[in-house]
Image: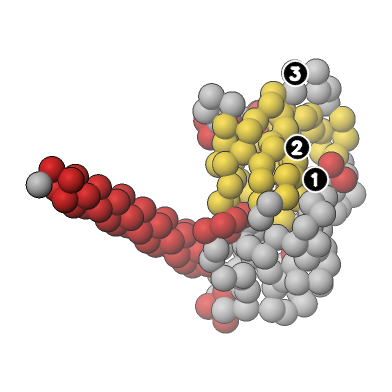
Amino acid sequence: MKRPLLIVLLISGMLTGIGRTAFAQTAYMDSLQSWRKNYIENHELLKKPEEQALLRFYPLDASYRVECGFESITDGGWVPMPTSGTRALRARKYGQLTFRLHDTTLHLVVYQLQFLLAKEETKNDLFVGFTDATTATDTYGGGRYIDCVIGDIHDGRMILDFNKAYNPYCAYTTGYDCPIPPKDNDLPVAILAGEKNYGKKMH
């Protein structure tokens, strides 16, 4: 009698684990849907519904949420970072992310932007801009950004979600000095997640 009972308990435990995983996956996808809806409806530049309707995205894909190893860079000095405008920004390397995406090991450099340190509400912001194999074809030629803050780093690890990759203001209009992602952050793969090219040529 003990063996059948043990098998039943094992199967029950497995089903419970599967149920929890499915619930977590559903909750995560729901949170992404909410994030995207909020991004569209509260876009800082595109206020009109007909403009927001032209925002385009890749399908949400949980495989593009990756856990990264974080290695701090302590000797990074302030250097000019080119922008899409006439003014260069001052930036320094804050750390390097290492992660696996679809069986490929990749790296991204995390930067601090000097002007963000001047304000209390942005002093902990970090800059993760990147280009990839979709840049200038399916996605904006000036690269895409992912928001993160120092508090996202825990015990040398950080979660990076490419589903939340978005276009800089310069993808829609002129007059902004948008940081251009450095060559360090040119990924040799296609990131089929996040925001795509805007549906209308704005400039």
Q: For the point 57% across and 41% down, which residue is it?
A: 67
The answer for how far apart the CA atoms under marks 2 and 1 are is 6 Å
In the image, 72 versus 140, the foreground residue is 72
Task: State the SS at label 3.
Answer: loop
Residue 137 in picture, x, y percent from top left: 81, 71
* Marks 2 and 1 close (CB-CB < 8 Å): yes
Residue identified by numbered label 2 = 109
Mark 1 or mark 3, which is nearer the start of the sequence? 3
Q: For the point 68% across and 52% down, which residue is it?
A: 103
Residue identified by numbered label 1 = 185
* Marks 3 and 1 close (CB-CB < 8 Å): no
Residue 6 in picture, x, y percent from top left: 19, 45
At label 1, the amino acid type is Asn
Q: How is the image coloured?
A: secondary structure
In the image, 49 versus 197, the foreground residue is 197
Residue identified by numbered label 3 = 74
Q: For the point 61% across and 70% down, which residue is it?
A: 57
At label 2, the amino acid type is Val
- On screen, residue 33 versus residue 15, left or right, reads right
Mark 2 or mark 3, which is nearer the start of the sequence? 3
In the image, 188 versus 103, the foreground residue is 103
Residue 176 in picture, x, y percent from top left: 77, 54
Q: For the point 72% across and 28% down, which residue is it?
A: 94
Task: State the SS at label 1.
Answer: helix
The answer for how far apart the CA atoms under marks 3 and 1 are is 19 Å
At label 3, the amino acid type is Thr
Task: State the SS at label 2.
Answer: strand
Tell me if mark 3 has few (under 14), some (14-19) or many (20+) residues whose alpha carbon lies within 10 angstroms of its own: few
In the image, 9 versus 17, the foreground residue is 9
Tell me if mark 2 has few (under 14), some (14-19) or many (20+) residues whose alpha carbon lies within 10 angstroms of its own: many
Q: Quadrant of residue 110?
A: top right
